Amino acid sequence: MKHFFIIASFAALFFGCKVDPKIVVANSPIQEVLPDGWPKPVYTFSNNPLSEAKFQLGRALFYDPILSIDSTVSCASCHQDFAAFANAGHQLSHGIKELNGNRNAPPLFNLNWHPYFMHDGGINHIEVQPLGPISNTVEMGENIGHVITKLQRSARYRNLFGSDEINSQNMLKAMAQFMGMLYSYNSKYDQVKKSGAQQSFTGSEFHGYQLFLTNCNGCHKEPLFSDFQFRSNGLKVNPALNDSGRAHITGLSTDKFKFKTPSLRNIALTAPYMHDGRFENLDSVLNYYTRAFENTQNLDAQLPAGGFQFSATDKKDIINFLKTLSDTALINNARFKDPKHF
Ligand code: HEC
Ligand code: HEC
């Protein structure tokens, strides 16, 4: 099977980098997944061959507060498995020494399809993403050199790295393997969409789905439920944060208040909502979308300035549809949980 992987990689070189995403590594539950009808992922593991050992190393690192300066905060402190790897109940991220960040922690799944990361797209590769929070002074407050020194001193990590050198490249590739394996494609919605489906939508969910397709799908596009574009959905600027969104990266006034369209998969599990967690629940989000938008500078043309015209039943039906996007196979998967070594 290993040979198959190598041959497939060579074939990929010949056939325009068409990597077969269903390659299975021998004797391992590790595999790339491409559900029917999904676009090709942006990140394939072609330069980071999947292995169980690397996945387990990435998993250990993700749950280990050793990545923070005072060993109090791990990636999982802000990205919790039961919340589809978002931060349940926290408007803004909460890092070392009780310090608050300035944005809401997004959920983590289907990351291989993201062309860039963060609400403003400020990071462009999954393999460098962890450097952001590690060095952020209010998140983990560390520097990568010191993290590597700590890992080199640890018998546990010498064992987990095996014959690979303990360096930042190997660490980051392992973390990309763990994060990249967080696929979410087993919600009720996915079951219903499969041909010959045993499940079907209720009347309310179906009506919600129709409204969703007409009004929301232009940005929260199926099947990933995001088009990954930067857009403004008209939120009033919070003066305490003064977050200009994408313009923070590009400096362009035409990018002001635009944020990466978030996926709505698992949305019922990831409250609170928006880049600053301003809405506590989905009712508040739907109420927001049915009022006149408060900040019209760069407001996306797909949004009617006066808000969507939804009845109370319409809103309830959309929310019932959104609940069909929750994937319990993701949040209950024992392989994604804390390996608990303490
Ligand atoms: C203190 C809380 C906190 C910690 C610790 C933390 N994150 Fe995050 N994470 C966030 C926030 C907040 C964002 C969004 C930041 C932004 O948009 O500026 C984010 C964004 C991300 C994203 C981008 C997701 C997307 O949809 O674009 C990934 C991936 C990620 N974090 C992985 C990690 C990893 C890996 C670690 C550990 C090395 C980690 N995070 C540690 C709060 C945290
Ligand atoms: C013009 C594009 C666009 C349309 C149309 C749109 N949205 Fe959004 N939506 C966004 C953007 C951009 C954000 C992120 C804003 C932010 O984080 O500040 C967002 C955020 C959300 C969130 C919060 C996600 C999270 O993880 O915090 C929900 C829920 C949501 N939208 C639901 C809907 C529903 C339901 C509809 C249809 C009634 C809809 N949206 C229509 C662009 C759009």
Image: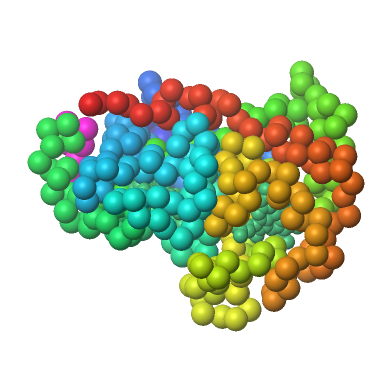
Q: Quadrant of the C terminus?
A: top left
User: Taking 184 as reference, is 195 left or right?
Assistant: right
Q: Position of residue 193 (x, y in %)?
A: 75, 31
Location of residue 65 (image quadrant): top left
Direction left: furthest residue: 153
User: Taking 240 as reference, is 208 left or right?
Assistant: right
The residue depicted at 48 percent of the width and 50 percent of the height is 105
Location of residue 64 (image quadrant): top left
Q: Quadrant of the N terminus?
A: top left
Direction top: furthest residue: 198
The residue depicted at 21 percent of the width and 47 percent of the height is 70
Looking at the rendering, the quadrant in which ligand 2 lies is bottom right
Whether residue 276 is situated above or below residue 89 in the rendered picture: below
Q: Is residue 306 visible?
A: yes
Query: In the rendered structure, which segment of residues is drawn in magenta?
Result: 159-166
Q: Position of residue 28 (x, y in %)?
A: 39, 24
Q: Position of residue 337 (x, y in %)?
A: 40, 28
User: Taking 309 as reference, is 230 left or right?
Assistant: left
The residue depicted at 62 percent of the width and 46 percent of the height is 280
Q: Position of residue 150 (x, y in %)?
A: 14, 45
The residue depicted at 81 percent of the width and 28 percent of the height is 201
